[in-house]
Every structure is written in structure tokens, then in C-alpha cells.
């Protein structure tokens, strides 16, 4: 399965939504982060979309409390 491609309008909407949000896709038995909102960046202290996506790709549960994992 290919990674989903968002339209420019949908990507802009998700990136600018005022709530911390991450969008994922389940591909070949793996969860792949696709997009995060600017509110997500601010909430978790990331400097860029690329940094957040990379970090989520390495450790999906980084910002999740151990009781919630």
C-alpha cells in the first residue's frame, strides 16, 4: 500500500487546526505518522513538522504516559 497523499487544502487545514493532532496511516503492519498540526508542535515543543514526524516514526509513544501505553 502507498502512503496517502493529502491535497494542498487538506494538508493546510490539518496543519493549521488549533488542536494538537497527529494523523497516521497503517501500512504493512506498521503505523506511519503522516501529518501533525502546528498546535501539536507547540504542545510537545517541536521546532518543525519534519522533526515531529521523524520523532513519531522512531518512537510512537514518546509523549504518552506509561499508564496509557
Image (cartoon, helix red, strand yellow):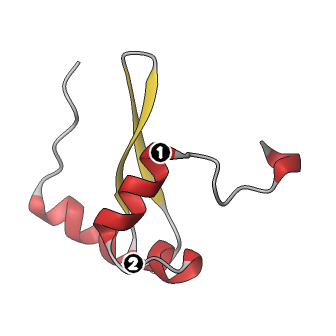
Q: Is residue 11 above or below residue 15?
A: above
The percent coordinates of residue 4 (x first, y second) are 22, 37
Instruction: Please give left or right for residue 43 compared with residue 50 in the image.
Output: right
Query: What residue appears at the point 47 percent right and 45 percent down from the top-left corner?
Result: 58
How dense is the environment of label 1, judged by Cα within 10 Å: few (below 14), some, or many (20 and up)? few
Number of marks drawn: 2
Query: What residue appears at the point 27 percent right and 69 percent down from the top-left corner?
Result: 13
Query: What residue appears at the point 52 percent right and 75 percent down from the top-left corner?
Result: 19
The quarter holding residue 51 reads bottom left
Q: In this view, does 16 lie above or below 9?
A: below
User: Closer to the camera, 34 or 55?
Assistant: 55
Instruction: Please give left or right for residue 45 compared with residue 8 in the image.
Output: right
Mark 1 lies on residue: 58
How dense is the environment of label 2, judged by Cα within 10 Å: few (below 14), some, or many (20 and up)? many
Q: In this view, does 62 lie above or below 3?
A: below
Label number found at residue 44:
none
The percent coordinates of residue 52 (x first, y second) are 41, 64
Tell me the quarter of the image containing the C terminus.
top right
Tell me the quarter of the image containing the N terminus.
top left
Q: Is residue 57 above or below residue 4?
A: below
Mark 2 lies on residue: 38
The residues bearing labels 1 and 2 have C-alpha atoms spaced at a distance of 20 Å
Mark 1 or mark 2: which comes first in sequence? Answer: 2
The percent coordinates of residue 57 (x first, y second) are 43, 45
Amino acid at each position: 500500500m502507498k502512503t496517502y497523499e493529502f491535497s494542498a487544502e487538506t494538508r493546510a487545514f490539518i496543519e493549521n487546526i488549533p488542536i494538537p493532532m497527529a494523523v497516521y496511516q497503517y501500512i504493512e503492519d506498521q503505523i506511519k505518522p503522516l501529518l501533525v498540526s502546528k498546535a501539536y508542535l507547540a504542545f510537545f515543543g517541536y521546532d518543525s513538522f519534519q522533526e515531529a514526524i521523524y520523532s513519531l516514526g522512531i518512537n510512537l509513544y514518546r509523549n504518552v504516559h506509561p499508564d496509557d501505553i
